Amino acid sequence: MPFTKYTNLDFEQIKDQIKDYLRANSDFTDFDFEGSNFSVLIDTLAYNTYITAFNANMAVNESFIDSATLRENVVSLARNIGYVPRSRTASKAKISFQVKFNGESPTVTLKAGLVCVGTTKNSSFVFSIPEDITTTSPLDDPTDGLIGDRTATFTNIDIYQGSYATKKFNVDTSLDQRFIINNSFVDTATLIVRVKGPGDPTAGKQYVKADGIVNVKAGSEIYFVQEVKDEKYELLFGDGILGKKLETGSQIVASYIITDGIEGNDVTNFSFSGVLRGSSDQNISPLGSITVSTTSKAQGGTEIESLQSVKYFAPKTYSSQYRAVTASDYESIVKLIYPDAESVSVVGGEELNPPKFGEVQISIKPKNDYFISDFNKQSILNRLKNYSLAGIKQSIVDIEVLSIELDCFVYYNSSKVTSVNDLKSSVSSTLGTFSESEDLNNFGGRFKYSKLLKIVDDTSPAITSNITKVKIRRDMKSQLNQPAQYELCFGNKFHVVSTGRNIKSTGFFISGVSQRLYMTDTPNDDMKTGIISFIQIDTNGKPSTAVQNAGIVDYQIGEIRLFTTNIISTDLPSGIVEVQAFPESNDVIGLTNLFVELSVSKSTINMVKDTISSGEQVSGIGFPVTSSYSNGNLTR
């Protein structure tokens, strides 16, 4: 009689099944007596069955990318569909410095390897360059002749956080060789591969990393990279059909940077530790110390691509077949060619207002920043041409950030709390964790109000309830000292109070008015639209209108438009005016190119003693009641 269940992974249930089988099909009578020898045999059979079933279950799970849990297996399955997970990325800084020395060398070379040591928050990090950088070193006084004081200037050079390393491989085609870089935490973007032929006295030819086989010919000097075990990388070369085949006696020299990833971000202070050489490879001795000036701080460092990301993007990249047609194709390809992208939004021209047929509008949120440089924009657009259809125009627009702010009133049982400040810190940490969730920090993200309430309540058993109000904010970048019109799209319907004060802002100054101004609104009779006005507040806190008709607001679609205004300064730096509204629904959604984030730093947490739960007021008289509706302040 066969067992009726084959997928059971519980030891006791497997043991009971064996007993049931013996009970129905055996002359033995002592198999269900725990002290018998037969019971020991049953335990052995059950244990063997349990281990076999567990191993079979794990083996099957690790065979599919959706259910695999080991990184080695997930990466291997992704490799089968042509996807290479992103490596750890080194943070990059821009620095400049001058080298003064006495000599005859017309050039100075900064050798590949260690350049600077950066310090931040009591930690130090090394910064390197993957290739030599050479600059001229003219004479300070041209009349000195050949030898004299010279100055070499290195301007805005990129340095990468991490240690410089090299690995050499000797090629023997008679063997089944694998060229594996025996270092984890390599930034493959800094990888430089050169191949020296047999008897080649030079440094060899630099090979180019290939992302696919398109345009790869038999003589193409290319290589491929794939992740292998323990987050290490293997170099693959051509076979004479797809890419040039290596010869016996050749030598492969791979140089790269081993990085700390995200830990190296935000370093601003650097001290020089590099090696300088002259035109004849002679040592250059600087006259005095070298002062390093920082053009841009270290940023862009990231960790290796997570398993969750690999599982998500590998099938998407495969389904796109490396051609950009649909929005999801563009999303996966942009992340492939620009690994620093944290989130990507793609909108077809037919969805724009007014429509722009034949155009694709792309918004990219880079890691550790909100905007990408014009250089990176153009670089992405140029590379997209290799994937897009002819006749389709792509454009990259800056993202629009929709910030969510919270006013949390957290009620707590004082009999269960030793420190209110510690409890408040715990709530703040909870909000910080929630702000990093998958629902937020992306285009088309959704802030789920009910989930927020639950996690705040679950922060501590001492918390009895919470009342949380939601505000939405856009930062308006002013064009200082020049007339301009402004449009702010919130993408969510506004909550409207007939008396106004639905729209608030930080302070700013405009041409022709000496007083600090703020935005406010007055709803029309239909309560669907309203008028934006600029108000000023005197020393007694009394408001008065400075500009009656400064713009319009559409409460239904959540849009504010300001007429031509010449803003000359703002209370906040960089010409920023924060504009706030209250959403009609506490579930906030980011539409099209709106990037949704929860601004914990500008949220408030108020701790309120629950006098009923603590037993101080059993009747409830005098209980501190908190309004669930918005405040009546005129300004932010």
Image (tube, grey):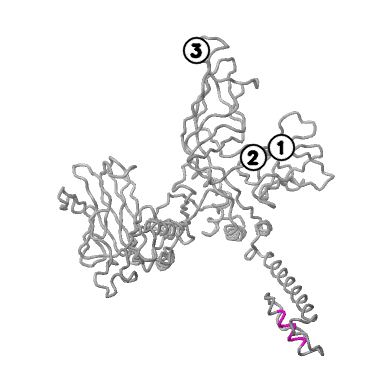
**On the picture, is 116 further left or further right than 84?**
left
Prevalent SS, magenta region:
helix
**Residue 501 relative to residue 362: left or right:** left
Q: Quadrant of residue 246?
A: top right
Residue 441, compared with residue 261, is above or below; it is: below
Residue 283 in the figure: left or right of residue 263? right
Q: Are marks 1 and 3 in contact (CB under 8 Å)?
A: no
**Residue that badge 2 annotates:** 256
Nearer to the camera, 325 or 21: 21
Q: Secondary structure at mark 2?
A: strand
Name which residue lies at 77% across and 35% down. 197
Q: Where does the image place residue 578, in percent across and percent down from the top left?
A: 31, 51
Q: Secondary structure at mark 3?
A: loop
* Span colored in magenta: 14-22
Q: Amino acid at mark 1?
A: Val
Q: In percent of the image, x 46 and y 50: which residue is there?
A: 395
Instruction: Indicate the position of residue 428 as horizontal and vertical percent values.
Output: 40, 57
Three-letter residue code for mark 2: Tyr
